[in-house]
Amino acid sequence: MLPLAELHLHIEGTLESDLLVTLARRNDVPLPTYDPAELTARYADFADLQAFLDVYYANLAVLRTEQDFFDLATAYLTRAAAAGVRRAEIFCDPQTHLRNGVPLEVVFGGLGSALAEARANGLSADLIVCFLRDLGGEAAEELLRAALPFREHFIGVGLDSAEVGYPPRLFEAAYGIAAAEGLHRVAHAGEEGGPEYVREALDVLGVERIDHGFRALEDPDLVVRLREERVPLTVCPLSNVALKGVPRIEEHPLRAMLELGLVATINSDDPAYFGGGVQENVAAVRTALGLTDDDLAVLARNSFGAAFIGDEERARGLAEVAAWRRSTAG
Ligand code: ADE
Ligand code: ZN
């Protein structure tokens, strides 16, 4: 199996229907149905990003206790390790949980314990705290200040949720604080928003990676810049199709990104909602775009190159990719 680093994964988006029902029963939270298959069937046709987010946020009401967050993250980490993930950089949305009355110590306590256990089992993993962009810049600053006492639990900040109408510049102050704290910085941009969102995330927020970013391809000058500055793009093919950013997987621009020399990586975004984890994403583009083993090795190498890890861990990941490529050459 292709070894890689997964760099774009929302822990809340890994809440599979079985666990959703278990947690709803455990915490006495009502669901529209308690049949996991029926819940999953409802994810078949999202009109757009907002339609997905409405379901995603509603489901998160079942997460109440440290144990719930531990169970959620442990389920993902176990699946990821079995799917060739060697390094996971995991987004979390604390503002959602605060809105549901769940304090930060519960969120970080549960997720932190799960990550510690995964590390003890050989999977490298860290958290990136995301700001919900539709709550605005002041709320982002407020969240970051409240999260700083839990600084040992996260390595960076990100920006997610509804994109259009919430440009990166609204978050300049929050990202300034993050930079001063030595935190890594990434942001969703160019998913529903145009190339100007990508440009602004780079120029105003100083991000080190762009999450999604496929709409950058509409701007040739920006493409040149992304290539020259080797800005990684964390691409999520099944998500892009599920949320109608790309009409069909056969039309996904991932192959074009590779041909343009962009540092693309492959990721699952919200695997419980979009048809599978990172290996399902790999399989989908491999078939639909006719990617070769060399292309997959480039994507995997890019993932270790773009990960927030030390030189030794990076070298180990790259060596594993080389070994995988040799094993498929036979
Ligand atoms: N939150 C979870 N998944 C997201 C996505 N694909 N875009 C924006 N916010 C998200
Ligand atoms: Zn995302």
Image (cartoon, rainbow, N blue to C red):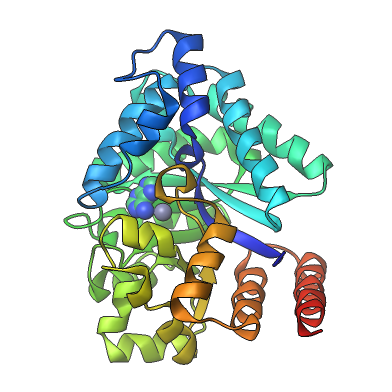
Residue 104 visible in the current orientation = no
Query: Where, quadrant-wise, is the C terminus in this rendering?
Result: bottom right
Q: Residue 274 at x, y = what percent? A: 41, 50
Q: Residue at x 67, y 54 (%)?
A: 83
Going by the image, does 163 lie left or right of 59?
left
Query: Where, quadrant-wise, is the N terminus in this rendering?
Result: bottom right
Q: Residue at x 42, y 57 (%)?
A: 176
Going by the image, does 246 lie left or right of 295?
left
Residue 65 against residue 45 in the figure, above or below: above
Q: Residue 178 at x, y = what percent? A: 48, 53
Can you tell which quarter of the image residue 131 is in? top left
Q: Between residues 95 and 31, which one lies in front from this camera angle?
A: 31
Q: Between residues 285 and 169, which one lies in front from this camera angle?
A: 285
Q: Residue at x 38, y 57 (%)?
A: 239
Q: Residue 297 at x, y = what percent? A: 66, 79
Q: Residue 294 at x, y = what percent? A: 64, 85
Q: Between residues 149 and 290, which one lies in front from this camera angle?
A: 290
Q: Residue furthest left?
A: 165
Residue 137 against residue 201 in the figure, above or below: above
